[in-house]
Amino acid sequence: MNDRQLIVPDDMQLLAEKAGYAPAVKVGKTLYCAGQVGRTADLTVIEDPEQQFLAAWENLRLVLAAGGCRFEDVVEMTTYHVEMSHFMPLFREVKDRVFPRGTCAWTCVGVSELARPGLLVEIKCVAVER
């Protein structure tokens, strides 16, 4: 039996069509989320770093919710950062506002660039529905 389900929140239909991938795939109770970034539903990159970080978390929240999960269900997270040493203090401050602290394994990776110019962070995770 194949219980693989593609997860595409309504606000991400354009992304799925243009980029050609699902924001998440659910297998059983496990949700595999593609990296989420700080952009609007029309795929515009948000320029202000704080607002971009907030939007990345909100986009992740939307994907998790569409897959029946919440932030508290995340078991593993990887974040990819452009100019990590410069933006990490602000990213952590935003993260601590919206995401529960100390509830999952977390790896941070510094990268030279992401998929679109201006993106500063990408948040990828695995969650398990309770």
Image (cartoon, rainbow, N blue to C red):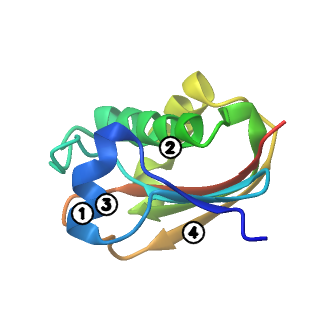
Q: Is residue 84 left or right of residue 77?
A: left
**Which residue corresponds to the image point at 24% horizontal and 63% vertical from the top-left?**
17
Cα distance in 3D space between marks 3 and 1: 4 Å
Q: What residue sits right under mark 2 in the picture?
A: 63
Type of amino acid at the residue the image marks with label 2: Val
Upstream in sequence: badge 4 or badge 1: 1
Verify CB contact (< 8 Å) between mark 2 and mark 1: no
Of 11 and 107, nearer the camera is 11
Which class describes the residues within 10 Å of circle 4: few (<14), some (14-19), or many (20+)?
Answer: few
Upstream in sequence: badge 2 or badge 1: 1
Which class describes the residues within 10 Å of circle 2: few (<14), some (14-19), or many (20+)?
Answer: many
Q: Secondary structure at mark 2?
A: helix
Q: What residue sits right under mark 3 in the picture?
A: 16
Cα distance in 3D space between marks 2 and 1: 16 Å
Upstream in sequence: badge 3 or badge 2: 3
Q: What residue sits right under mark 4 in the picture?
A: 109
Q: Farthest top residue? A: 97
Which class describes the residues within 10 Å of circle 1: few (<14), some (14-19), or many (20+)?
Answer: few
Of 114 and 5, nearer the camera is 5
Q: Position of residue 46 (x, y in %)?
A: 20, 42
**Which residue corresponds to the image point at 22% horizontal and 37% vertical from the top-left?**
48
Of 111 and 9, nearer the camera is 9
Determine whether 124 is above or below 20 in the image: above
Q: Quarter of the image for the C terminus: give it.
A: top right
Type of amino acid at the residue the image marks with label 4: Val
**Which residue corresponds to the image point at 41% horizontal and 42% vertical from the top-left?**
9
Q: What residue sits right under mark 1 in the picture?
A: 17
